[in-house]
């Protein structure tokens, strides 16, 4: 009897190919470092931009509440009555004729701007029926760049 030939290919010793070489890991680290150097500076300004956008949205929301107040009562709250007139019936100045139960703002309170400051409300305003603004991160009137005020008459 002849020994049977195996139909399988010759067996070669298996080479361990698991894991990465040090060079491969170093190349990946360099690429990640380059990407981080390009992307991180752009992302770092995003929180401030998000706060400014939130302030603009809050101003627009308060504007809508003020317009509803005027529809019900025939006029905007005075500067003396302030934005508080949107959450509780005014007790000074010209009183609201048909103040809505529950007020005009959700959660029953006037929100603070994203930097924790109160919005500034002036009625009658210098730029329209009323002026509504946030003084931005510095909390002071005026400012440029990141410290610039956010004003209702400048929003679209």
Image: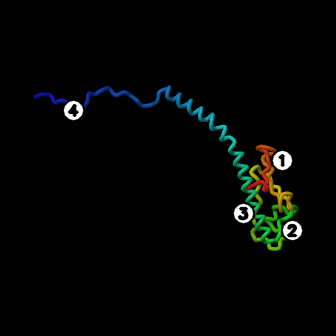
Residue corresponding to mark 4: 7
Badge 3 local density, few (<14 within 10 Å), some, or many (20+)?
few
Is the Cβ of the residue at disc 4 closer than 8 Å to that at disc 2? no
Between 74 and 4, the one lying in front of the other is: 74
Vertical placement of residue 19 versus 93, above or below:
above
Q: Position of residue 97 (x, y in %)?
A: 83, 73
Q: Position of residue 35 (x, y in %)?
A: 59, 35
Q: Quadrant of residue 102?
A: bottom right
Residue corresponding to mark 1: 142
Q: What separation in Å lies between label 4 and label 2 (alpha carbons)? A: 100 Å
Q: What separation in Å lies between label 3 and label 2 (alpha carbons)? A: 21 Å
Is the Cβ of the residue at disc 3 closer than 8 Å to that at disc 4? no
Is the Cβ of the residue at disc 1 closer than 8 Å to that at disc 3? no
Q: Earlier in the sequence, mark 1 or mark 2?
A: 2
Q: Secondary structure at mark 1?
A: loop
Q: Earlier in the sequence, mark 1 or mark 4?
A: 4
Is the Cβ of the residue at disc 1 closer than 8 Å to that at disc 2? no
Is the Cβ of the residue at disc 1 closer than 8 Å to that at disc 4? no
Q: Secondary structure at mark 3?
A: helix
Residue corresponding to mark 3: 106
Between 146 and 127, the one lying in front of the other is: 127
Residue corresponding to mark 2: 91
- Looking at the image, which residue sits at the far left? 1
């Amino acid at each position: 009897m002849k020994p049977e030939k195996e139909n399988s290919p010759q067996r070669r010793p298996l080479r361990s190919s698991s894991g990465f070489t040090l060079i491969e890991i170093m190349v990946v680290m360099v690429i990640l470092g380059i990407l981080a150097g390009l992307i991180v500076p752009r992302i770092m300004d995003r929180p401030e931009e998000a706060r400014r956008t939130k302030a603009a949205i809050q101003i627009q929301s308060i504007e809508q509440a003020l317009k509803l107040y005027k529809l019900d009562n025939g006029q905007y709250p005075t500067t003396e009555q302030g934005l508080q007139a949107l959450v509780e019936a005014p007790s000074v100045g010209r009183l609201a004729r048909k103040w809505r139960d529950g007020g005009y703002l959700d959660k029953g309170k006037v929100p603070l701007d994203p930097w924790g400051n109160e919005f500034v409300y002036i009625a009658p305003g210098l730029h329209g029926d009323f002026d509504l603004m946030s003084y931005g991160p510095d909390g002071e009137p005026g400012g440029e760049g990141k410290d610039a005020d956010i004003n209702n008459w400048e929003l679209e």
